[in-house]
Image: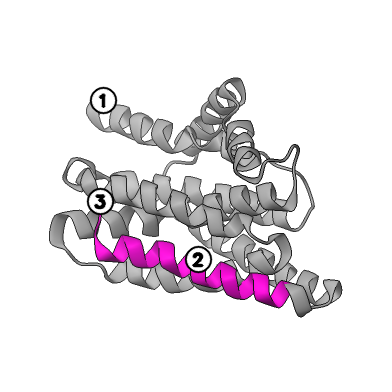
């Protein structure tokens, strides 16, 4: 769990957020919005590219629908928001809360998180996570320039989640096979598209409530595999 690459990824978010917060103080609102719109559009594009890797769209659809229902019932996103409210000692959807939730989801929903962590845990190869660290650091600059300190808090989520994935890498190694990875990537892509739509303020989609779908898609693909 304490692999150096996981720590580097968390620190990259902290450093990037620090730069973004510094920029935030001296940058006009219209310029911050231009930067934010740019990364939102790139996020949307990445999501579309990932979604096209889907192998079984019905499985992804079922996973997204069931996962969202589970997320709504358990109020996952609301719990994440309350955690940020507790840290900030605030109420409601402040910039801090939005920054924490948006960046946490963006940095953790995607194949690089899974593949990179599994690679570290099974072979010790940290290349993917180090590349991801650079990407997350750059994204942190832009997101923090709009939302501020909440992005910095997401570094803890990055460290904990990726650290746990590294610890259980040998158990999760099967996820790196195409049978599981394609649908997982496609589902992650749809969720990242939803993050992009949310960042563009087109629609307030509760992406956090979709998180159970990432488990359900693996189960459904396993059921499909065992039934053939």
- The local secondary structure at tag 2 comes to helix
In the picture provided, is 20 more to the left or to the right than 27? left
Where is residue 109? Give x, y as percent. Answer: 48, 50
**Residue placed at 38% from the left, 59% from the top?**
112
What is the C-alpha distance between the residues marked 1 and 2?
Answer: 46 Å
Instruction: Report crowding for label 2: few under 14, some 14 to 19, many 20 or more residues within 10 A (C-alpha).
Output: many
Name the residue tied to disc 3: 1
Q: Quadrant location of residue 42?
A: bottom right
The residue carrying mark 2 is 14
Task: Name above or below for residue 1 compared with residue 210.
Answer: below
* Mark 1 surroundings: few (<14), some (14-19) or many (≥20) residues within 10 A: few
User: Is residue 93 or residue 121 the one in the foreground?
Assistant: 93
Circle 1 SS class: helix
Upstream in the sequence, badge 1 or badge 2?
A: 2
Residue 109 in the image: above or below residue 16: above
Look at the picture and state if 97 lies above or below 144.
above
Q: How crowded is mark 3: few (under 14 residues within 10 Å), some or many (20 or more)?
A: some
Q: What is the C-alpha distance between the residues marked 1 and 3? A: 35 Å
**Dot 1 or dot 3, earlier in sequence:** 3
Evaluate whether residue 39 shows in this view: no
| Number of the front mark, 1 or 3 | 3
- Location of mark 1 (residue): 227
Residue 12, position as x, y percentages in the image? 45, 69
Question: Taken as a whole, is the magenta stretch helix, strand or loop?
Answer: helix
Magenta region: which residues?
A: 1-24
Find the distance from the CA under tag 2 to the CA under tag 3: 19 Å
Q: Nearer the viewer, mark 1 or mark 2?
A: 2
For the point 63% across and 35% down, which residue is it?
A: 82
Whether residue 150 appears in magenta in the rendering, the answer is: no
Q: Earlier in the sequence, mark 2 or mark 3?
A: 3
> Viewed as shown, does residue 123 lie left or right of 165?
left
């Amino acid at each position: 769990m304490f692999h150096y690459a996981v720590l580097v990824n968390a620190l990259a978010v902290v450093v990037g957020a620090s730069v973004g917060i510094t920029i935030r103080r001296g940058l006009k609102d219209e310029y911050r919005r231009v930067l934010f719109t740019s990364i939102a559009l790139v996020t949307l594009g990445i999501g579309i590219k990932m979604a096209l890797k889907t192998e079984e769209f019905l499985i992804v659809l079922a996973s997204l629908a069931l996962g969202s229902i589970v997320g709504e019932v358990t109020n996952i996103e609301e719990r994440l928001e309350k955690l940020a409210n507790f840290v900030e000692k605030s109420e409601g959807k402040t910039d801090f809360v939005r920054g924490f939730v948006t960046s946490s989801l963006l940095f953790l929903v995607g194949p690089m998180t899974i593949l990179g962590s599994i690679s570290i845990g099974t072979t010790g190869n940290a290349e993917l996570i180090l590349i991801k660290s650079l990407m997350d650091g750059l994204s942190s600059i832009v997101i923090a320039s709009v939302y501020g300190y909440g992005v910095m808090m997401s570094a803890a989520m990055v460290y904990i989640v990726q650290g746990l994935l590294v610890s259980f890498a040998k158990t999760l190694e099967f996820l790196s096979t195409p049978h599981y990875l394609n649908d997982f990537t496609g589902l992650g892509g749809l969720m990242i598209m939803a993050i992009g739509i949310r960042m563009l303020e087109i629609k307030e989609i509760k992406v956090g409530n979709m998180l159970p779908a990432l488990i359900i898609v693996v189960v459904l693909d396993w059921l499909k595999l065992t039934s053939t």
